[in-house]
Amino acid sequence: MSKSIKILKLILRVLLGLFFIATAVLKLFSLDNFEIYIYSFKLFSFTFSTLVARCVIMAELLLGALLIAKIQYKPAWWATMAMLVGFTFLLIYVAIFRHDSNCHCMGDLVKINPLWSIVKNVVTMLLMLLVRKEDDYQFRGKVAVGVTLLVAAFAVPFACFPMDSVYNLFDKDGQPINDKLFVSFLQDSTAQSLNINEGNYMLGYLASGCQYCRVSARKVNTIMDNNQLDKTKVIFFIWGSDDGIQEFKDDTEAFDYQYVKINPVEAVNLVNGSFPTYVFLKDGKVVKAMDLRGITEKDIKAFLNE
């Protein structure tokens, strides 16, 4: 093999490895939405979907690094091809039956629909064939480097971006709501007109322009859809302009809920400036208040089905 071909194959192999690492990093930037997207297939519980999301990211980080470092190259090459084939079949299903505008293969920063993602995978597989016949680098400390790459690939999605179920194991400091103001809020004419003093309701306090509020609305909406829960039991108290609130609905696709416009100063005081905040209300009394990370499928199902 000529030197120029070797150099071209080296460049291609490194670029492919960097591409897989880049796709993993892009997913990390919009990890919440990637979790929700996996959960929307109704194959796993929400908690298990968060685990699957991180395993995908870990695999992309590790395989990309192994391709570049040429450690366990042949197993890494075959695992990468298997992953591409598996994702391609999933994308074909999505393109035929779901028609999603973004398959989250490259996160939210680079939105790509299933058809273009299929093309991307096919091209990537063809390029992978060009670097199939490679042997491992032999160097001192190879095992230590491989172990380090494995630990790093695990630590980034699991330790740096812990799952909500892990986050919720720890007590959080601070009060999620102002109890005194909340009692007054439930007694004013707006709240009284909603007839929420009897039964179980989930109240969300949101800002229309808040990114995390939008993520929380998508999360709640997907949980409600997947479990066929009564959406009249969820009320969003939201502040922002009329156009901003409409954009919020369009972006989150959380249309089938009652939206109550709230004064921003009142909203900030009620939830101590923490958006989003969700409250479980039972017969007019607060049972639980939580932030985005505190929202769990198990709790919502149990509370609204009670």
Image: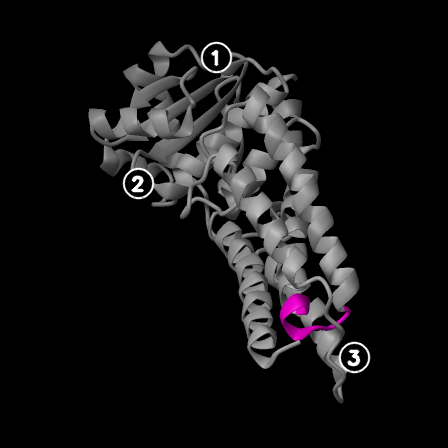
x, y percent for residue 157: 61, 57
- Circle nearer the N terminus (3, 2): 3
Q: CA distance from mark 2 to mark 1?
A: 25 Å
Instruction: Say which amino acid is labelled 2.
Output: Val
Q: Which mark is residue 143?
A: 3
Type of amino acid under label 3: Val
The residue shown at (70%, 32%) is: 44
> Which residue position holds label 1?
232
Left or right, residue 47 beside residue 191: right
Q: Is residue 259 magenta-colored?
A: no
Q: Is residue 276 visible?
A: no
Residue at mark 3 to residue at mark 2: CA–CA distance: 53 Å
How far is mark 3 from mark 1, CA to CA?
57 Å
Query: Above or below — where is 33 with respect to 227?
Result: below
Type of amino acid under label 1? Thr
Residue at 65%, 33% in the rendered image: 90
For residue 268, the mark is: 2
* Circle 2 residues within 10 Å: few <14, some 14–19, many ≥20: some
Observer-nearest residue: 35 or 27? 27
Q: Is residue 224 left or right of residue 62?
A: left
For the magenta stretch, what is the residue range?
66-72
Say which quadrant the N terminus sits in. bottom right
Q: Height in image: 224 above or below 18? A: above
Furthest-bottom residue in this view: 140
